[in-house]
Amino acid sequence: MTLPPAFQSQSAPRPLPFDPSRLKGLSERLIRSHWENNYGGSVKALANVKTRLAQAAGDADLPPYVYNDLKREHLVRTGSVVLHELYFDNLGGSGRAGNGERQAIAQAFGSFDAWETEFRLIGAGLGGGSGWVVLGFNLHTRQLENYWMADHAHGPAATLPILVMDMYEHSYQIDYGAAAAKYIDAFFQNLQWEAVRARLDAANATKTPVG
């Protein structure tokens, strides 16, 4: 069965963009478990859900609320795949932000340190639970802001993720148990700021949606 493009999905996880044995403070065991089980599981689940959606859409006897159960899972799994790929892509670096990134962030937050303080604070507030911290570029306001996200399914409108930190316990429990603050420290030590800069450049080049 050939699925229409809207119901197609990648069949395998994207490879890690870095050597997981070379991160500082994040073990290879942790990273591989996160990549294979959490991200990889969502890739497989999304492909399964989209296939089932294509099949269910042609079932005239299927109640709409049953179809929407699949659509809810579609939303959740799409968010998980996208956010995990962004997360892994902004890891594997030196942790040192370049002048361009620092200036752009400082312009939005008053100073680079003020941005980092708020970003870390949001992460600490999610410790022991679940969610994401996202530095995003809002295409409507043309502004960089830090966002709190409780799950994979709900994000700020018209916003492109620039920097993504996973705060689900699976992202740090193997290495740090409940010590989420230590994980946040390690996350910052491994940031790939070149990826952040590329996302910033792409966001600034994107036109504001008409509305």
Image: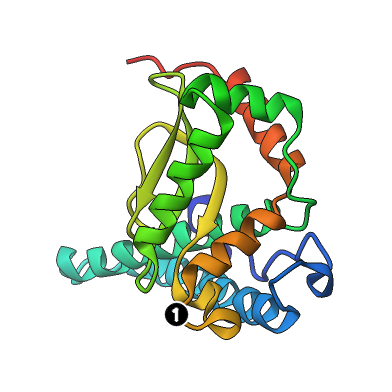
Indicate the position of residue 97 as horizontal and vertical percent values.
72, 38
Residue 71 as seen in the image, left or right of residue 208: left
Q: With respect to residue 55, does 90 lie above or below?
A: above
Indicate the position of residue 10 as horizontal and vertical percent values.
63, 63
Indicate the position of residue 145 as horizontal and vertical percent values.
43, 32
Q: Residue at x 53, y 16 (%)?
A: 207
Tag 1 residue = 178
Q: Residue at x 77, y 58 (%)?
A: 92
The answer to whether any part of residue 57 appears in the image is no
Q: Residue at x 47, y 46 (%)?
A: 119
Residue 13 as seen in the image, left or right of residue 208: right
Q: With respect to residue 147, does 50 lie above or below?
A: below
In the rendered picture of this protein, how many numbered marks are placed on residues? 1
- Say few, some or many: other residues with alpha carbon within 10 Å of mark 1 (under 14 / 14 to 19 / 20 or more): some
Tag 1: residue type? Ala
Secondary element at image label 1: loop
Q: Residue at x 38, y 14 (%)?
A: 210
Please tell me which residue lies in front, 81 or 106.
106
The answer to whether any part of residue 169 appears in the image is yes
